[in-house]
Image (cartoon, grey):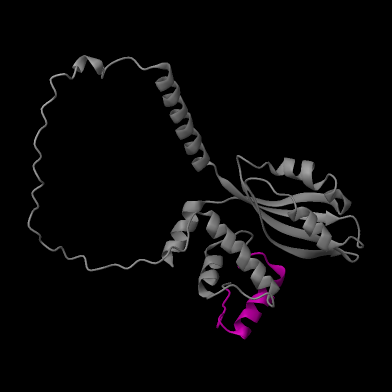
Amino acid sequence: MAVAFTNLGSQSGLQKLNEYLLTRSYISGYQASKDDLAVYAALNSPPSEEFVNAARWYSHIDALIRLSGVTEGKGVKIESSAVVEESPITPPVTEAKAPAEDEDDDDVDLFGEETEEEKKAAEERAAAVKASAKKKESGKSSVLLDVKPWDDETDMKKLEEAVRSVQMEGLLWGASKLVPVGYGIKKLQIMMTIVDDLVSVDDLIEEHLLTEPANEYIQSCDIVAFNKIWFVFFFLLLINF
């Protein structure tokens, strides 16, 4: 069943969106979709912290869009495409300079063998191009983690701070929320976006989240969802707006 939102620029519209996202990470389903982009595009600005659920969702979708490589741009003005005929411009003629009599053509060897320095420079350029191409081809994934505390007395704010304190190249933490488990215990659900070639989720959990000092608050971590981010998909969706 389709969900309808009205007057998202008003307090009442934002309140309805905020209530809707209280128990949801996305507008529909368990990963970002065209529905999220439609609502994102309808908002003139990020929701204030008063609407904590809507602000969390907006921040996460904004991060996904930015990682897709699509930016807002600076604006462009398109002028008339009519072509104005102009008289051809004749380039100035320069006089050919006669070679000096004392110049010796034998000093320049255009077809000589490469020196060791030239070969090394060529190899370094080829390696740089290869590394750059590999970096561009590296994919990204969106991961949803369940982070569980030791008991109901665990400070969940400090638990989340411990999780977000883990920083590394290729890792971007996203939106989060607390989900009741039972007996007064809540778990932290948190989104993260990773560069597949740079970050191993298993290593992140075992070597960072379940070791000191984070394990003072964290009892266990589980991967709830692991989805590839298809940049072309997001780009095409954005074009539709």
Residues shaded magenta: 3-27
Residue 186 located within the stretch drawn in magenta: no
Give x and y (percent) for residue 61: 58, 63
Q: Is residue 96 left or right of residue 146?
A: left
Residue 161 makes an appearance in the image: yes
Give x and y (percent) for residue 30: 64, 60
Q: Residue at x 56, y 51 (%)?
A: 229
**Quadrant in the picture for the C terminus:** bottom left
From this view, report whether residue 185 is shown above or below residue 48: above
Q: Is residue 98 left or right of residue 2?
A: left
From this view, report whether residue 34 is shown above or below residue 44: above
Q: Residue at x 47, y 37 (%)?
A: 133
Residue 138 occupies quadrant: top right
Residue closer to the observer: 3 or 114: 114
Tell me how many marks there are.
0
Residue lying furthest front: 102
Q: Is residue 211 left or right of residue 232?
A: right
From this view, report whether residue 91 is shown above or below residue 65: above
Q: Is residue 81 left or right of residue 173?
A: left
Residue closer to the observer: 237 or 73: 73
Residue 18 located within the stretch drawn in magenta: yes
Residue 28 makes an appearance in the image: no
Residue 75 occupies quadrant: bottom left
Give x and y (percent) for residue 46: 59, 72
Q: Residue at x 73, y 40 (%)?
A: 203
Q: Residue at x 86, y 49 (%)?
A: 215
Give x and y (percent) for residue 87: 7, 57
**Quadrant in the picture for the N terminus:** bottom right
Residue closer to the observer: 9 or 226: 9
